[in-house]
Image (spheres, rainbow, N blue to C red):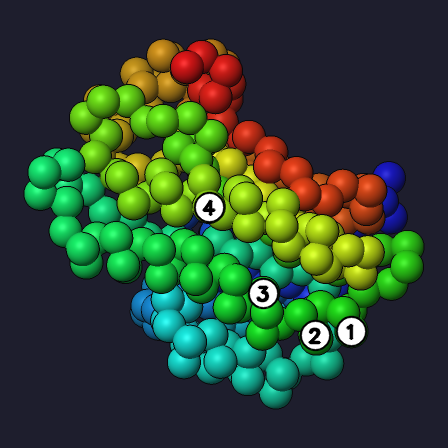
Amino acid sequence: MTDLFGLPGKVAVVTGGGRGIGLMMARGLLQAGATVYLSSRKEAELDAAVSELATHGPVYAIPADLGTADGVAALAAGLAERENAIHALFNNAGATWGAPFAEFPESGIDKVLDVNVKGVLLLTQALTPMLRAGATADDPARVINTGSVDGLRAPAKGMNNFSYSASKAAVHMLTRHLAGELAPEILVNAIAPGLFASKMTKHLLTAGDDVVGAGLPLGRIGSPDDMAGIAVFLASRASSYITGAVIPVDGGVSTIR
């Protein structure tokens, strides 16, 4: 089982890795033996993440704005300078925007779709040669996209994140489309997280993690280990017969409406 789930010798890239879900995934990958590269726009956050994670294994930061073609090219070039191949790409960088329907601005559409959809496609495209270089017949390379429970069912009335929910539904379909395009050398799957503690969900947890979690089917919000576990599974040989899947990691939220 150590061989099945272990990641020694593998190189993983985690975008949006400076905080939140990206940081949780990166920790799990490092503890499973991978070398991890983190990327996001905010260099200070990346530096703090590297300092926090360094005790778990080799981790490096390459700052880039992944909502732009130039940022995608910069990350791809930085990785090519350091590695000949990568084995797992976690497209986790994300943006959100909230505003009432009648006031929702064009900028709130463009920013979210640029990062959450365009960035996922462009970065996967740019890193496909390095992913193919890391693939073997028994253990294909991996692309794991971060979707959302909000892309599986419509958010509740008053959750004014219109472009976010649309973008995450797009990520789920893009995952399925890329799975067919890149098989069999590269497996493409998505994680659809529910409620985890992060900067993006802070406003949803003002009543407290325990109070909010008590209203979910499993009675709690997600923990760092929950996200680390699914990340390691999807990057490891244990998932080598899975592609095109969108896996809810939401404590059952997607089952109740």
Q: Position of residue 197 (x, y in %)?
A: 37, 36
Q: Amino acid at mark 3?
A: Thr
Residue pointed to by mark 1:
133
Q: Nearer the viewer, mark 1 or mark 4?
A: 4
**Are the residues at dot 1 and dot 2 in contact (C-beta closer than 8 Å)?**
yes
Q: Secondary structure at mark 1?
A: helix
Residue pointed to by mark 4:
170
Q: Position of residue 108 (x, y in %)?
A: 21, 53
Q: Amino acid at mark 2?
A: Met
State the separation of the CA atoms marked 1 and 4: 28 Å
Residue most toward the left?
Answer: 103
Q: Position of residue 156 (x, y in %)?
A: 28, 22
Q: Which mark is residue 130?
A: 2
Q: Secondary structure at mark 2?
A: helix
**Are the residues at dot 1 and dot 3 in contact (C-beta closer than 8 Å)?**
no
Q: Nearer the viewer, mark 2 or mark 3?
A: 3
| 10 Å crowding of disc 1: few (<14), some (14-19), many (20+) | some
Left or right, 196 with respect to 34, comes to left
**Residue at 76% from the left image edge and 49% from the top image edge:** 236
Q: Secondary structure at mark 3?
A: helix
Residue pointed to by mark 3:
124
Q: Position of residue 238 (x, y in %)?
A: 81, 42
State the separation of the CA atoms marked 1 and 3: 14 Å
